[in-house]
Amino acid sequence: MQKQSSGSTEVFYHLMDLSDKEKSLYLERLKAEQPGLYQQVLPLINEEPSEQITSLFGFHAQRVTETELDLTNTLVDKYQISHELGRGGMGVVYAASRADRTFEQDLAVKFIQPALSHILGEHALFQEAQLLAHLNHPCIAKVFDGGVYEESVYIVMERVEGETLSLHLQNRSLNEKQKLNLFKEICSAIEHAHQKQVLHADLKPENILIDPLSSPKILDFNLTQKVKQPVPNKNTDVSLLTAYSKAYASPEQAAGQFLTQQSDIYSLGKILALIFDSSSNLDIDLIVEKATHHEPYRRYTSVSELRQDIVRMLECRPISLREKHPLHTLSKLLKRRPVQSALTILLLISGATFSTTIFNKNLQLQKEKQVAEEMMYEVTSLLFHAKGSNAAKMSVGTMLELTRRRILSNPDLPKDVKQKMLLAMLTPAPEKSVTNKNKSSSSSN
């Protein structure tokens, strides 16, 4: 298998030096004589030049990890290797402990493939490992040491006990607040790395372990993310030799372009979508949509900006994408401070009711004042007519009839006032003689 891998590499480099016509003839002969080798080389030929070296390296590294590096129960420097923890295209990770027994410490040792060390150089790998050693965050696995063993660079790290993010989500029924807090811690760790000028470049659920205390630990930072060394293909940069998961890698990473912080932000958006799988939360959908936008400049400018939106959700505040929506802002306020909001609303309703009552009372007083003025005007007019030349001939009945007509014809008097006045005018007054007789009867008795 290893021989076959070397053969495909040699054939690929040989084809690069041929003209199109010579390449076609060579491939036809290879297909007839060695169909297996032809099938390995064909995908590399059909790819874009910027992707060829990445695919070639990934294929070669995978073949190497399948056949080499079994260091179980091996003593490496002052570290006793015990058993394998994981294996990937970049290398193999083993559980280990200090052989000198100076400290009781559970460690993980990652051995980088010798082929990768040869291509990138040991010095470049150690530079990247040194950057990781400068990271000091509770949610990032700590790097302690490093070295070279049988042409393979190794990195000594903190060993994390726990389950992957995917398993944790499957085994636990987390509520929205717990999910948001978990993702906020992941963002905090990546934000710290970016502040130290370190990209992860391979964020995925398998590289996030959740410890027994439900705290996340970020593992497996990509050591090749900033390396730029000449490679056999003059059209390609070694920064393209990056391991990644297609489901969580940004479009620019899949295209082999140089990575920025927006690449990690894209992966974080995909992880957030996984955490809130099948959720119907509009805020989460908007955050994921922005973080995973195809164009890097349309994503969040920093992990800090992304984390702040998560904090806003935890605090029941509107996220940055919905700050200009008044109704949404009001609903968040009601959720954030229900008691204060209820008291405020009650106070506003009471104030509005009181103001309305006062306003209506003022209207009623003004109306009554206007009625009184109209009545005064009618009485004054009646007295004025009574002083005229025909006053002696005007009887009481005539005056009442005149008053009735004036009241009915006055449009400024309310209908209910007119009815009351007319009723009073039609009610007969008690006779004086009857009253006097009653008084006499009372005296005689």
Image (cartoon, rainbow, N blue to C red):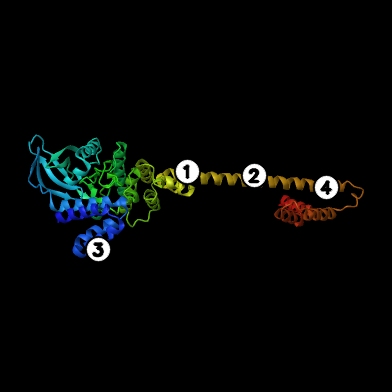
The amino acid type, in three-letter code, at marker 2 is: Asn
What mark, if any, has residue 70 been given in the picture? none
Q: Is residue 40 visible?
A: yes
**Marked residue nearer the N-terminal end (2 or 1):** 1
Q: Report the side of 175 relative to 141 (left or right).
A: right
Q: Nearer the viewer, mark 1 or mark 4?
A: 1
Secondary structure under badge 3? helix
Residue in front for this viewpoint, 275 or 60: 60
The amino acid type, in three-letter code, at marker 4 is: Ser
Secondary structure under badge 1? helix
Crowding near the residue tagged with mark 3, few <14, some 14–19, many ≥20 C-alpha atoms within 10 Å: few
Residue occupying the far right of the picture: 389
Report if the CB atoms under discs 2 and 4 are less than 8 Å apart: no
The amino acid type, in three-letter code, at marker 3 is: Glu
The amino acid type, in three-letter code, at marker 1 is: Thr
* Image quadrant assignment for residue 141: top left
Report the Cα–Cα distance between label 4 and label 3. Answer: 124 Å
What mark, if any, has residue 362 been given in the picture? 2
**Marked residue nearer the N-terminal end (2 or 4):** 2
**Marked residue nearer the N-terminal end (3 or 1):** 3
Mark 3 highlights which residue? 28
Mark 4 highlights which residue? 381
Residue 225 position in % (x across, y down) = 27, 43
What mark, if any, has residue 344 been given in the picture? 1
Crowding near the residue tagged with mark 2, few <14, some 14–19, many ≥20 C-alpha atoms within 10 Å: few
Q: Nearer the viewer, mark 3 or mark 2?
A: 3
